[in-house]
Image (tube, rainbow, N blue to C red):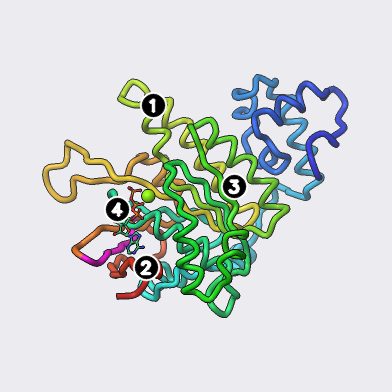
Amino acid sequence: MEDLKSLKIRGVGPITINKLIEYGYSPELIAVTPAWQISRETGIPVDKVELIAERIREDMGIGDELMTAKEYYEMRKSMEKISTGCKALDNLLLGGIETGSITEFIGEYGAGKTQICHQLSVMVQLPRELGGLEAKAIYLDTEGTFRPERIVQIAKYRGLDPDRALDNILYGRVYNTDHQILMVRNLFSIVKKENVKLVIVDSLISHFRSEYPGRENLAMRQQLLNSHVHDLLKLAMLHKVAVVVTNQVVSSPDVFFGNPLKPAGGNVVAHGCTYRIWIRKSKNKRIAKVIDSPCMPEMEVVFSITENGIEDL
Ligand code: ATP
Ligand code: MG
């Protein structure tokens, strides 16, 4: 199905359809979002949403039947990896950043999260034999720290034409949480049209934290963040793109032993992100470590940030 406007269902008029569009819902997103959630957000009665979603799923051939573990295994094998351009980091990630999942880079100021995002938006463009997917990247920048000049440097080092490398990155500056949520929803149709294999949100959390400060806003913030992370996960799985997000660390005052720092966003982010990499700065090198992974070894690797981007030490 191309767009919602071409949908003809008895009892569903243009007002309903326009409302869905206004809230950033594409057919794909409606197909995979709980009807009650869409209903609560848009005010459209839940039975009407169900009717629409059912029709879309029918058209898209999305069923609710089970699959065998073997089929699931085959599907997982079709997931591809984007090399980080750094052997140590690739080893840590069992080959690179995976499509179909969310990978989260966590760290303090200056840890190198944004640098990794720049590097990946170049790496995804490389031919497969060099670790890329010959595809475009989308870069959602919430902090205004994206630097095209940096892309030029990294692209040159990787043997890409800098102008083409810049053309292959679709950039969006994100101004607030509403904007961020809507932009991600709009990506469902963009990713389908363009050859995009990487979506970056740098940073996932910053707007949520500044717009919903303090304990009194925590429940609301976590609820919004939860639905946003799920949108990203759906985007990753449905369109087989790699989603990369960055996250800050916060200090938890109640920790007396061990590391008082923890990733922001709590359980909502922890559960939504498949791979979580913690980066810390140590003199002139960076140390990366996987945290809470279902299938990766707990180990640490080192790398450096240079003029050329992210490199092995
Ligand atoms: P924040 O939480 O503030 O967003 P971050 O984890 O995104 O931090 P980055 O902006 O990725 O941090 O890292 C900045 C660091 O990267 C700089 O402090 C510097 O050490 C390094 N860096 C940036 N550009 C270059 C360069 N051209 N050559 C060498 N190192 C660089
Ligand atoms: Mg940054």
**Beta carbon at label 2 within 8 Å of ligand 1:** yes
Mark 2 to mark 1 CA distance (whole Å): 37 Å
Q: Nearer the viewer, mark 3 or mark 4?
A: 4
Question: Does the magenta run of residues contain 50?
Answer: no
Main SS of the magenta part reads strand
Q: Nearer the viewer, mark 2 or mark 1?
A: 2
Mark 3 to mark 4 CA distance (whole Å): 30 Å
Q: Nearer the viewer, mark 3 or mark 1?
A: 1
Circle on res. 234: 3
Question: Which structural element holds mark 1?
Answer: loop
Q: Nearer the viewer, mark 1 or mark 4?
A: 4
The crowding category of the residue bearing disc 2, from other C-alpha atoms within 10 Å (few below 14, some 14 to 19, many at least 20), is few
The mark nearer the N terminus, 1 or 4, is 4
In the image, what residue type sits under mark 4?
A: Gly
The C terminus lies in quadrant: bottom left
**What count of labels does the image hold?**
4
Question: Which structural element holds mark 3?
Answer: helix
Question: Which structural element holds mark 2?
Answer: loop
Mark 3 to mark 1 CA distance (whole Å): 25 Å
Q: Which residue is mark 2?
A: 307
